[in-house]
Image: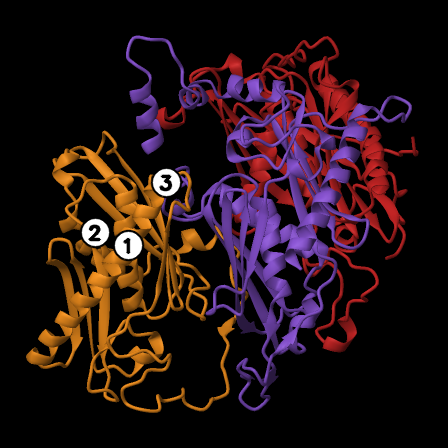
Amino acid sequence: MAPRTDRSPTALRPLALSQSLLARADGSTKFSFGNVSVMASITGPTEVRIREELVDKATLEINVRPLRGLAGPSHKAAETLLTSLLAPLILLHLYPRSLLQLTLQTLSSSSTAFSTAFSTSPSSLTPSPSTVTLQSLPPSSAESAARINASMLALVDAGVACKGMLVAVAVAFVEGELRLDPTQREEEMATSRHVFAFSFGVDVGGTEGECVGVDSVGQFEVDELFEAQSLAQTATQAILAFIRKSIETRYGATGAPPPAAVKPAPAMKEEKMELPEEESEGDESMDDA
Amino acid sequence: MQQADRRRFGAPEGAVPLRFASTSSSAKPSSSSSRLDGRAPEQVRPIFLQTGLVGEASGSAYIETGRTKLICAVYGPKPTPPSAPFNAKARLNVEVKFAPFSSGVRRFTPGKDTESASLSATLQQSLLPSLILEALPKSQIDLFLTILESDGSDADISAGVTAASVALAEAGVQMYGLVVGCCAAFVPSSPLPLLDPTRAEAKTATAFASLACMPALGTITNVGVSGVVSVEQLDETLQKVVQACGQIHGVAKGALEVESA
Amino acid sequence: MAQSTTASTEAPAGTSALTPALFKRLHPRPYLDRFLQEGVRPDGRPLGADAGEAVWRDASVNIGSISTAPSSALIRLGNTTLVCGITLEIAPPDITTPNQGFIVPNVDLPALCSPLFRPGPPSDEAQVLSTRLRDILIASNVLPLASLIIEPAKAAFVVYLDVVCLNFDGGILDAAVLACVGALKNLRLPKATWDPDTGATLCEPISEKAQGESIPLNPLPLSVTFGIFNGHLLPDPTLFESTLCTSHITIVVSSTTSKLLHVYQAGAPLFSAGADGVEGGGREQLKACIALARSRAKGLLEILA
């Protein structure tokens, strides 16, 4: 596997964040790691079906939709992961007998099987037995991390009360090298993939972050796991800084809404109103902690 | 149905069952009166019956005869949902399922397949007369039967009836008596009908008869006959089957006595 | 159920006497707490990492009981009972991977095994288990897909691993992995030849003369789950304990190498490094879990052999 040319092994891809995209949803966010982008929309607190009603807290319902085709068992697993991560952080007790419905849709990821040239000739593709890669497992770590981030930010956009912020990032070991925010190809060639989720906030991790989610698959040593976790922690701190900056730019550091643009008098020329633009960051360069 | 398909990992495109090179035809019994496994024509296979395997169920039974293995669990009696119309007698819901690996060729059908549906109906018909359902208005009893290894689906259901009845007894549902099932096949190679046939034996059958009865009361709850058979022969055979049921009833009773001991 | 009727007839009306069964039903959390304070769990297992083998439920494996399946394994883990049956089919390999066969695992939680499940299509829980089982089996590469090839680019075996739960009492993922591994160990593939003229594959039936080929398996994955309740670590929780635990950790270790194959934890803060990289108490706890998992894996391997 060729070394990275566009960024250092411990650098994130360009992050992109835009909120309030959907007019009919209470909150919506589009979050991207490079070209892997996920949109989350949340409706709630809203009316809940009697069958699912919980007397003392809100019912959290999560739906994950894939980029293509219908959702299958792996998307159910993704829903379960999100529920386990978000339920402890959202102050569900503030919204009893109501429903928080979160829907996630993957908007883009690099194309799956045909991103690189391949040959159908049997002789050319014998996998080398020494390095076992996760080729047969559909690459989804970066997508999973993007989903977690998009969900959290949709909750922020909707104004749902939470104890803290949840930020996630994916890490992979490719040929013994630790790579942050792996691309599709890197995930396929990886010997192990990890998704780490950290919570930040008063009593839930402070500014350092507390690891609340681990989903690692592959073949790895314990030390490799801890090394990956440390890198992920620093990376999530950087992602949180980006998120904060993006939201502050939008709302102003004091939290006040941006002043409305004033329409000039009709006699003068028509001027177009500037809509809030999508915020995107350039490369975040990360050094080893 | 699309719905269940996408809730499981599906087969790859173009998957077909294994095809075996033709083998020598299955061994024929040496004499007309002995069977492949050496039984006499009236002999039923030894039965292993155990209760209480499913902890959370009101009653459960696991039965093994020859290569047939199935497990049955009863949940209830429990109240019917308030949205359902009033029922003066308890409702017995029976569901029979085949495990995907039960028949050699992988069975996978989303939702109910027709074979399961007809077996469920037969099983329910066999059990209903034995239960005192009037004692449980506004209730339902759920009975689930999973066939882990199948050796001919008609013989499966006979074993299933026995297991289901034992499970219902363990669950404490009031009943007039235990129902046991047995079946017989008429094969050209034998003048006598073969009781409790295996799939290999039933393959060459010209007629098949299955029976569910309550030996304690001496009544029959369900009879099914298919194929061509004379009335006298059928009468004789059913007598023999009823006798065999008496033996099976002893085994079923024993399994319940062990459990309560 | 018989148990609850006995309980209600024992406690005379009008008194405040709570039988253990009623207490368990009405106040499950304090019930579990009372046990843990005494250093025991409700099923009698001791609490504490130095209790050795006794923290785990008894496991038993019965291989090859289903004769209609090329291989099968019946697992009992405490009260949890499940069967894994393998069926084989033949399919042309995927165009992009002409040298690989297929493994299709599925977990079925039928209405039979617990009152929690209704009849019908696979529940959410079953789908999640199927996904995690598939991830574990593929990541561990226990059955190399290349060994399933009959004719490159033309025909390969499809190995269906159908896991059916018969009694649901927690630890399903652990039992499912163990069942699949047990069934795979015993699997013999029939000799198959692809006929270029007909495009079909013919297999030789397995008999005493033609035993078929057993596939050399890579290091076996062995899964261990822990529950966390009120700061206590509960190895191999039962269903009652699982529903009360705030979160779970699953660790899958390899049978021969020192590598981990899968670590999963979601929801509760588990391990965190200090500000300057100093290991906090959380990492030590994870290391302790891994050590426990490894010792359990040794025990499970002996049962499989």
Question: Is residue B104 in view from this perspective?
Answer: yes
Residue type at tag 1: Ala
Contact, mark 2 vs mark 1 (Cβ under 8 Å): yes
For this rendering, which residue is in front, A69 or B17?
A: B17
Relative image position of residue C252 (x, y in whole percent): 70, 46
Q: Chain of mark 3?
A: B
Q: Which residue is mark 3?
A: B57
Name the amino acid, label 2.
Leu
Task: Say whether residue B80 is left or right of residue A105.
Answer: left
Residue B119 sits in quarter: bottom left
**Distance in Å between CA atoms under marks 2 and 3:** 19 Å
Label 1 environment density (alpha carbons within 10 Å; few <14, some 14–19, many ≥20): many
| Image quadrant containing the N terminus of chain A | bottom right
> Looking at the picture, how far across and down is residue C114, in whole percent?
41, 41
Figure chain in purple: C
- Chain at tag 2: B
Image colour for chain B is orange
- Numbered label attached to residue B178: 2
Q: Which chain is red?
A: A
Q: Nearer the viewer, residue C209 or C114?
A: C209
Spatial CA distance of label 2 from label 1 is 8 Å
Q: Is residue C293 left or right of residue B116?
A: right
Q: Earlier in the sequence, mark 2 or mark 1?
A: 2
Q: Quadrant of the C terminus of chain A?
A: top right
Res B252 label? 1
Q: Which mark is residue B135?
A: none
Whole-percent x and y of residue C234? 64, 30
Above or below for A133 versus B36: above
Looking at the rendered structure, whether the residues under marks 2 and 1 are on a common chain is answered as yes
> Where residue C153 appears, x then y in whole percent?
65, 76
